[in-house]
Amino acid sequence: MITLKGDTIYIRALEPNDLEFIYAIENDESIWNVSNTQTPYSRFLVKQYLENAHQDIYEAKQLRLAICQDQDFPALGLIDLFEFDPRNNKAGIGIVVYEKSSRGKNIGSEALGVLIKYSFYHLNLHQLYANIDSNNVASIALFTKFGFECIGTKKDWILTNGTYSDEKMYQLINKQF
């Protein structure tokens, strides 16, 4: 198994035993606004997704990885590349550290750093982007820490509990290419 390592975490491919973890994340209404989810997922659909997770990023146009801290495999979160566009060398990036007790412990920061490095040096991407709710102060701080710059605002873009909020687009260009 290939893993991408940081100092205290590693990110790895999804495994069949991630079914319950992904099922919990996909069905947690409190984070649907960050994942653009509207409906619950069945275990059957999550199992089918995991069975197809072996697809190459060039075929699936996305890559979802588990964020872990130890070799016993329990996932703490997920980090994704989505809308992978090899012609224009770009992809969207998203992250969720699921357990609130695991947040604020540098786990997301380390995982994001590992995936940025992988994206630029192994996938040869020219740019990454993230769409972040303007109220998500933690995510904005995380992405700007790595040099992502706000390049635009989509006004009243996200409806959460009857209130609209703006979505900001952040971009990181690999200046080495």
Image (cartoon, grey):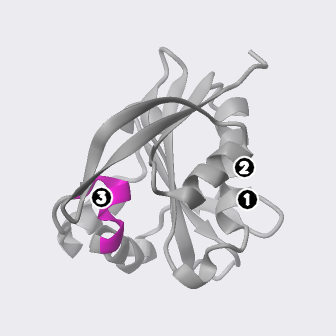
Whole-percent x and y of residue 64? 47, 53
Q: Which mark is residue 110?
A: 1
Residue at the right extreme? 7
Residue at 70 percent across and 24 percent down: it is 174
Is 87 in the magenta? no
User: Which residue is label 2 attached to?
Assistant: 113
**What secondary structure is found at the residue carrying circle 3?**
helix
Q: Are marks 1 and 3 in contact (CB under 8 Å)?
A: no
Q: Callout 3: few (<14), some (14-19), or many (20+) C-alpha neighbours within 10 Å?
A: some
Residue 27 is drawn in which quadrant? bottom left
Image quarter in which the C terminus is found: top right
Q: Residue at x 62, y 30 (%)?
A: 123
Q: CA distance from mark 1 to mark 3?
A: 26 Å
Rendered location of residue 149, percent (x, y): 63, 33
Of the residues shown, which amino acid type is indicated by label 1? Glu
| Vertical relation: 20 (above or below) 107 | below
Q: Is residue 13 left or right of residue 28?
A: right
Foreground mark, 2 or 3? 2
Labels 1, 3: front one: 1
Is any part of residue 51 visible from this angle? no
Q: Which mark is residue 68?
A: none
Q: Quadrant of residue 167?
A: top left
Q: Which residues are magenta?
A: 30-37
Q: Residue at x 67, y 44 (%)?
A: 144
Question: SS class of the residue under badge 2?
Answer: helix
Q: Amino acid at mark 3?
A: Tyr
Residue of label 3: 49
Residue at coordinates 70% horizontally, 58% vertically from top-left?
109
Q: Quick one: quadrant of the N terminus? A: bottom right
Q: CA distance from mark 2 to mark 1?
A: 5 Å
